[in-house]
Image (tube, helix red, strand yellow):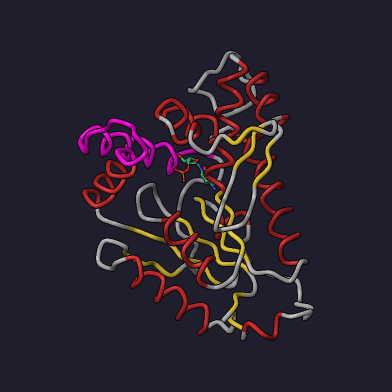
C-alpha cells in the first residue's frame, strides 16, 4: 500500500521520531522530511558565520545578524527516506548537524521567531510540492501537527519514558562515534524539552487531534504497525498500482 497525504510526527527528543517517521515513509512509499535537520543546519550556518548570538532573546533584536544568516542559508533537503540528506551550500552536513555543538545551540536558534517563520514557509513549500507530485509525505518535528500542517490527516505525538529516551540518545551518540553518558544525555534532553516547550513561538505540544503513541512499550515494528493501521483507518492508503500515472488530489 502507498500513503497519500501528510502524516505529522511530533514529540520530544529521543522518543523515536526519526526512526518512526522514516520507517513509515519507507514502508508506505512516501517521502520523508526531517524538520529538526533544517533547524540544525540553520544553526550550523549561524555558528560557521561566527556572528554574535544572544541565546536569551527570541526576538530578532540583538540577533539580527544571526537571523539574517539563518534565513539566507542555502539549504537543500532531500526527501528520499532511503537517503535523507541535508545540504548546506551544497555540502552534506548530515553528520555535523548532529554533533554536540549544534545540538547545544539549536534550541536557542530555533526559538527565534523569524527563523521559524522562514523555515515553516520552506517546510510548507516542500510538503505542497510533494503532494502536487502525487506522493504522500511523513513530516517529523515539534510543531508539524499544530503549525506547519495543521490539516494533516494523521497526527502522531510520540512519547517515551525519560530513561528510555536518554538510553536511546546515548546509544545513537556512541554508534556515531560521539562520546556520551546516559546521565549527561538525560540532562541535555531535559534542558531541550524545557526550552522547546517554553518558547513563545510555536512551542512543543501535542495537537488536540493527535494520537499519542508510547514508544517505550512497543518495538519499532510495533510502532510502525500502529501508524500503518491509523493511516489505513483514515483512508490514506491506496494500492500501489493505482499510483501509476494516477493524479492524486492535493491536500493534507
Ligand atoms: O528533532 P531534532 O532533535 O533534530 O530537533 C533539533 C531541534 O530543533 C530541537 O531542539 C527543537 C528544534 N525543532 C523545532 O523547534 N521545530 C521543529 N519542527 C523541529 C525541531
Rendered residue at 64%/38% (across/down): 87
Q: Nearer the viewer, residue 33 or 191?
A: 33
Residue 181: x and y in percent read 22, 34
**Which quadrant does the C terminus fall into?**
bottom right
Chief secondary structure of the magenta portion: helix
Q: Position of residue 183 (x, y in %)?
A: 20, 35
- Residue 196 part of the magenta-drawn span: yes
Task: Using the image, determine if residue 204 lies above or below residue 151.
Answer: above
Q: Is residue 180 above or below residue 140?
A: above
Q: Residue at x 49, y 22 (%)?
A: 55
Image side of residue 79 versus residue 18, left or right: right
Residue 175's quadrant in the figure?
top left
Please tell me whether residue 88 belongs to the stretch shown in magenta: no
Q: Which residues are magenta?
A: 173-200
Which residue is drawn at the image coordinates 34% and 58% (left, top)?
Answer: 159
Numbered marks: total: 0
**In the rendered image, the vertical position of residue 250 relative to residue 183, given as above or below:** below
Q: Position of residue 22 (x, y in %)?
A: 49, 59
Task: Give the residue drawn at x 48%, y 23%.
Answer: 56
Vertical side of 128 occupied by 119: above or below: above
**Quadrant in the picture for the N terminus:** bottom right
Residue 113 occupies which quadrant of the picture? Answer: top right
Q: Is residue 5 left or right of residue 186?
A: right
Residue 196 vs residue 54: left or right? left
Residue 64 point in image, percent of width and height: 67, 20
Amino acid at each position: 500500500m502507498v500513503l497519500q497525504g501528510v502524516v505529522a510526527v511530533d514529540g520530544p527528543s529521543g522518543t523515536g521520531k526519526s526512526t518512526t517517521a522514516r520507517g513509515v515513509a519507507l514502508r508506505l512509499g512516501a517521502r520523508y522530511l526531517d524538520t529538526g535537520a533544517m533547524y540544525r543546519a540553520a544553526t550550523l550556518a549561524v555558528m560557521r558565520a561566527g556572528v554574535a548570538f544572544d541565546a536569551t532573546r527570541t526576538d530578532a533584536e540583538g540577533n539580527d545578524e544571526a537571523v539574517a544568516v539563518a534565513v539566507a542559508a542555502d539549504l537543500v533537503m532531500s526527501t528520499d527516506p532511503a537517503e535523507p540528506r541535508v545540504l548546506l551550500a551544497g555540502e552534506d552536513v548530515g553528520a555535523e548537524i548532529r554533533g554536540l555543538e549544534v545540538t547545544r545551540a539549536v534550541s536557542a536558534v530555533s526559538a527565534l521567531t523569524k527563523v521559524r517563520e522562514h523555515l515553516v514557509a520552506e517546510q510548507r513549500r516542500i510538503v505542497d510540492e510533494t503532494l502536487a507530485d502525487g506522493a504522500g509525505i511523513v513530516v517529523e518535528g515539534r510543531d508539524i501537527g499544530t503549525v506547519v500542517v495543521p490539516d494533516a490527516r494523521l497526527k502522531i505525538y510520540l512519547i517515551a519514558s525519560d530513561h528510555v529516551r536518554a538510553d536511546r540518545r546515548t546509544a545513537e551518540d556512541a554508534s556515531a562515534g560521539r562520546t556520551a553518558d546516559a546521565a549527561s544525555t538525560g540532562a541535555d534532553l531535559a534542558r531541550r524539552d524545557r526550552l522547546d516547550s517554553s518558547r513563545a513561538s510555536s512551542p512543543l505540544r501535542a495537537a488536540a487531534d493527535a494520537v499519542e503513541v508510547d514508544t517505550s512499550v512497543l518495538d519499532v515494528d510495533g510502532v510502525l504497525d500502529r501508524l500503518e493501521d491509523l493511516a489505513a483507518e483514515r483512508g490514506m492508503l491506496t494500492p500501489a498500482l493505482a499510483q501509476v500515472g494516477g493524479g492524486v488530489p492535493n491536500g493534507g
